[in-house]
Image (cartoon, helix red, strand yellow):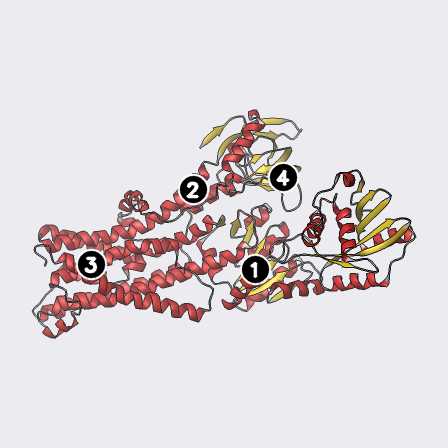
C-alpha cells in the first residue's frame, strides 16, 4: 500500500501523469498459463491440511484413502503399493491445485486493486465550517470532507456540494474522467480515486475497511465467497454417490474372501477412488471461482456466487430504454421538406441553424447533412462571421443571422410563432408531418428561414432515439434461450410501442415509475420466474433489491450499489445481456464436467474389476477389452488416469465451456453428445496409453 501524506502538493502535471498510468488498465486475470500450475503448487500443498479437505466430502474420502494406503505402503513396501499410494496423493494434490490456480487468479486481481489504495490525509469539516486534517482511516459515516484538484478522495461517499471531474481509471480501467456532482444519480464517489478539477464536498458513507475497494478485494480473493445453493445441492449429491460406492466397495471384500481371493486395502482404495466422482469433486470449487473471475474480467463485480448462478437461470430481463436499447440521445434521422422547398434547401438551412448548437441533437443534424447531402462539416469564414443564436429555454429555438438572412430551428410552436411574427405563413402540411413523426415515436424540429423579406418554413427534421445496432439480433438470441425481454421507459405508450417493435423486445412498460418496476418484478416472481434488471438511481434501489439479479451502475448512487448484487464498473447497461450469458456458461460448465466425471467411470470398471477377480472368475477376462498387461498395471493405469484428467480439465474449468445461445433441450443434447459420449471414450484411450508405459515398470508389468 502506498502512502500519500499530502495530496494537495501534487502538481497538475503529476495528476495527469497518474491518470495516464492508470488509463486503460482493467481488472483482468488473463488466459490460462501452464506456469500458473507451478506458481500455485505451494498453495496446493498447504491445502493438504485435513481441516481444509473436510470441506469437500469427495476429496476427503480420497485423502483418507491416501493416508491409509501410505500406512500399508510403509509397512509392506512393494513397487505396486508405493506407485499406487503416490498417485493417490497426486489425485488429492491435483484437486487442490485446481482450486489454488482459480484462487491465485483472484489474488492477482486483488493485488492490482491494493495498488490503487492510498492512505490519505482527509480535510474534514468541523461544525463551524473550518477544516481539520485527519488520517483517512479515522473518518466515520456522516463526516464531511473537502477534496480539491490533485487530491485523492479519502473514502466512499456522496458529493453534497460542488461538481468535479474524477479519475476513476484505477478502479474501472476507463481512461476518460467522469463528472461527479451533488444531487442526482451521479453523486457517488469511490475512495482511492483522484479529483482532477474543481472542488467538492463529500459525505462519507462507509466505515474504514468496508469501502467499495475493500469489498472488491475480499470478493475477488474468495475470502467472502460462500457456496451457492446449486453448489451445495451438487456437493450433497456427490457425497451420496460417494457413500453408495464406499458401501459397495466394502461389501466386495467379504465376497472376495469367501471366494478365496481377498483384496488388499490399497486395491480396494484404488477401486473406490476411481469409482467415486473425483473429477467433478476436484473441479467444483474452481468452476465457481472462475465464474466470478470471468465477470471481473469484464469489469463486473458480483457480490456473491448466488448472483452469478441466478443470472444463468434468469427468465425475464428488464431493460431501460435509454442508454440500453437506444443510444440515449436523440439523433437526426430524416429531413422532410414542405411547400416549395427541396430537401437540399432544407439540408442547407438545417446545417446553418445547427453549426453553433453543441447539443447531441444539434451535432447529429450537422452529421446528417454532411453524410447524406455532402455539405461541409465546419463553418466557413463567412459563416463564422455570422451571429449565432444559441438555444434558450424561453425561445426554444437556435440558429444563425448572416448577411441579412435568418435561419431558425426548434419546437413547432416556437418556430410557427417566429414565422408569423416575420410576416410568413405556416402551411397545414407542416402540422401533418409533425403529427406523423410524433405518432411514430420521434421528435419533430421545424426549420424556417427569413430572407429577402420573406419568411417560410423549409421543412421538418425528424429526431429519433436510435436503437443500437445489433440489439434485435441479441434479443432474438435471448428469445431462443427462453428469456423474455421487457423494455422500461418513461415515454408515452405510442412512442414506447414503436421503439419496442423496432428493437424486437417481447414487451414494454410505458410511463414507468419506480413503483411500476417493483410491481412488474413481483408479478414475474409470483409466477416462479427469476428477474434481472439494471439501475443507477436512488429510485431504482428498491427494484434492484427485489430483483434476483440487480446490476447497479458504478456511476450511480451509493443506495443503488448497496441494493444491487452486482456492480458494473463500466456503467454499461447493455452488459446485463453478457452477465446472463456468463451465468449460463457457469451452469453449463458445471453440468458438462459432472456428466464427463460420471461417464468416465465406465472405463474404470473394465480396467479394475477384471484385474481384481479374473483369477477366480476367468469369464471376467473378457471385460479386459483394452488388453491391459497385468492386474497391477490395470489398477495403476486407472489411478494415474483418474489423477491426470483433473489437471487436464483445469483450463476448461477456468475458461468455461463455450456457450452458444440455444434452447435448453439442444444444450442438453450437445452436452450428452460431447461430454457424455466423450466421457466414455476418453478413459478407454487414456488408460490404454498409460498402460503401455506402466507395464514397463519392473514389478508391475
The circle drawn on residue 639 is 3
- Mark closer to the observer (1, 2): 1
Tell which circle, 1 or 3, labels the residue nearer the N-terminal end.
1
Residue 315 percent coordinates (x, y): 52, 65
Residue under pointer 2? 110
Mark 4 element type: strand
Q: Residues within 10 Å of mark 2 (few under 14, many from 20)?
A: many
Tell which circle, 3 or 2, labels the residue nearer the N-terminal end.
2
- Alpha-carbon distance for marks 1 and 3? 50 Å
Q: Residue at x 14, y 64 (%)?
A: 628
Mark 2 element type: helix
496 versus 55 height, above or below: below
The circle drawn on residue 470 is 1
Q: Quadrant of the N terminus?
A: top left
Give 388 or 394, whichever is nearer the viewer: 388
Q: Residues within 10 Å of mark 1 (few under 14, many from 20)?
A: few
Residue 620 percent coordinates (x, y): 14, 73
- Alpha-carbon distance for marks 1 and 2? 35 Å
Give 152 or 66, whichever is nearer the viewer: 152
- Mark closer to the observer (1, 4): 1
Residue under pointer 4? 159
Residue 414 percent coordinates (x, y): 84, 52
Tell which circle, 1 or 4, labels the residue nearer the N-terminal end.
4
- Alpha-carbon distance for marks 3 and 2? 37 Å
Give 128 or 389, whichever is nearer the viewer: 389
Q: Residue at x 19, y 68 (%)?
A: 606
- Alpha-carbon distance for marks 1 and 4? 37 Å
Is residue 229 visible in this depiction of the protein? no
Tell which circle, 1 or 2, labels the residue nearer the N-terminal end.
2
The circle drawn on residue 378 is none
Amino acid at each position: 500500500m502506498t502512502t500519500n501524506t499530502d495530496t494537495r502538493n501534487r502538481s497538475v502535471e503529476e495528476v495527469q501523469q497518474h491518470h495516464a498510468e492508470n488509463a486503460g488498465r482493467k481488472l483482468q486475470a488473463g488466459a490460462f498459463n501452464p506456469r500458473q500450475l507451478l506458481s500455485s503448487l505451494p498453495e496446493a500443498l498447504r491445502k493438504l491440511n485435513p481441516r481444509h479437505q473436510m470441506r469437500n466430502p469427495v476429496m476427503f474420502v480420497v485423502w483418507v484413502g491416501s493416508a491409509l494406503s501410505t500406512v500399508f505402503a510403509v509397512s509392506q513396501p512393494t513397487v505396486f503399493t508405493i506407485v499406487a499410494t503416490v498417485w493417490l496423493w497426486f489425485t488429492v494434490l491435483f484437486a487442490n491445485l485446481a482450486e489454488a490456480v482459480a484462487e491465485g487468479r483472484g489474488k492477482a486481481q486483488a493485488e492490482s486493486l491494493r495498488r490503487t489504495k492510498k492512505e490519505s490525509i482527509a480535510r474534514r469539516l468541523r461544525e463551524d465550517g473550518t477544516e481539520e486534517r485527519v488520517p483517512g482511516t479515522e473518518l466515520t459515516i456522516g463526516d464531511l470532507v473537502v477534496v480539491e484538484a490533485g487530491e485523492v478522495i479519502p473514502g466512499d461517499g456522496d458529493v453534497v456540494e460542488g461538481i468535479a471531474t474524477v479519475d476513476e481509471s484505477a478502479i474501472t480501467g476507463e481512461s476518460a474522467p467522469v463528472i461527479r456532482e451533488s444531487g442526482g444519480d451521479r453523486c457517488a464517489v469511490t475512495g482511492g480515486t483522484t479529483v482532477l478539477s474543481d472542488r467538492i464536498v463529500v459525505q462519507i458513507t462507509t466505515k474504514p475497511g468496508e469501502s467499495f475497494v475493500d469489498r472488491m478485494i475480499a470478493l475477488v480473493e474468495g475470502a467472502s465467497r460462500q457456496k451457492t445453493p446449486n453448489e451445495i445441492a451438487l456437493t450433497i449429491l456427490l457425497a451420496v454417490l460417494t457413500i453408495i460406492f464406499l458401501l459397495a466397495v466394502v461389501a466386495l471384500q467379504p465376497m472376495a474372501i469367501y471366494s478365496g481371493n481377498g483384496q488388499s486395502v490399497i486395491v480396494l482404495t484404488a477401486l473406490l477412488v476411481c469409482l467415486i466422482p473425483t473429477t467433478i469433486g476436484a473441479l467444483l470449487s474452481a468452476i465457481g471461482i472462475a465464474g466470478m473471475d470471468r465477470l471481473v474480467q469484464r469489469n463486473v463485480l458480483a457480490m456473491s456466487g448466488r448472483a452469478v448462478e441466478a443470472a444463468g437461470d434468469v427468465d425475464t430481463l428488464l431493460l431501460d430504454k435509454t442508454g440500453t436499447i437506444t443510444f440515449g440521445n436523440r439523433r437526426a434521422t430524416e429531413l422532410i421538406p414542405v411547400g416549395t422547398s427541396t430537401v437540399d434547401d432544407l439540408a442547407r438551412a438545417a446545417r446553418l441553424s445547427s453549426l453553433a448548437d453543441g447539443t447531441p441533437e444539434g451535432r447529429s443534424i450537422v452529421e446528417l447533412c454532411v453524410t447524406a447531402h455532402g455539405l461541409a462539416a465546419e463553418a466557413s469564414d463567412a459563416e463564422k462571421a455570422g451571429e449565432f443564436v444559441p438555444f434558450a429555454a424561453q425561445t426554444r429555438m437556435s440558429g444563425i443571422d448572416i448577411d441579412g438572412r435568418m435561419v431558425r430551428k426548434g419546437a413547432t410552436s416556437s418556430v410557427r410563432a417566429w414565422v408569423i411574427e416575420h410576416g410568413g405563413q405556416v402551411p397545414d402540411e407542416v402540422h401533418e408531418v409533425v403529427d406523423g413523426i410524433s405518432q411514430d415515436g420521434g421528435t419533430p424540429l421545424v426549420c424556417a428561414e427569413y430572407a429577402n423579406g420573406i419568411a417560410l418554413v423549409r421543412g421538418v427534421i425528424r429526431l429519433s432515439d436510435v436503437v443500437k445496432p445489433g440489439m434485435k439480433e441479441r434479443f432474438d438470441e435471448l428469445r431462443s434461450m427462453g428469456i423474455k425481454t421487457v423494455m422500461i421507459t418513461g415515454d408515452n405508450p405510442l412512442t414506447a410501442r414503436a421503439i419496442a417493435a423496432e428493437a424486437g423486445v417481447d414487451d414494454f412498460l410505458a410511463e414507468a415509475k419506480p413503483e411500476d418496476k417493483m410491481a412488474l418484478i413481483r408479478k414475474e416472481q409470483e409466477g416462479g420466474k427469476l428477474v434481472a434488471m439494471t439501475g443507477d438511481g436512488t429510485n431504482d434501489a428498491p427494484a434492484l433489491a427485489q430483483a434476483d439479479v440487480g446490476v447497479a451502475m458504478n456511476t450511480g448512487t451509493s443506495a443503488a450499489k448497496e441494493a444491487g448484487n452486482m456492480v458494473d464498473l463500466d456503467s454499461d447497461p447493455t452488459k446485463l445481456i453478457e452477465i446472463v450469458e456468463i451465468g449460463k456458461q457457469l451452469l453449463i460448465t458445471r453440468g458438462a464436467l459432472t456428466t464427463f466425471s460420471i461417464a468416465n467411470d465406465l472405463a474404470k470398471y473394465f480396467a479394475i474389476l477384471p484385474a481384481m477377480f479374473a483369477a477366480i472368475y476367468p469369464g471376467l477376462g473378457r471385460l479386459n477389452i483394452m488388453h491391459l498387461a497385468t492386474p497391477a498395471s490395470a489398477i495403476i493405469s486407472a489411478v494415474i488416469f483418474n489423477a491426470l484428467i483433473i489437471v487436464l480439465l483445469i483450463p476448461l474449468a477456468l475458461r468455461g465451456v463455450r456457450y452458444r445461445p440455444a434452447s435448453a433441450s439442444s444444450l442438453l443434447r450437445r452436452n450428452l453428445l460431447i461430454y457424455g459420449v466423450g466421457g466414455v471414450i476418453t478413459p478407454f484411450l487414456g488408460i490404454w496409453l498409460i498402460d503401455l508405459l506402466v507395464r514397463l515398470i519392473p514389478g508391475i508389468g
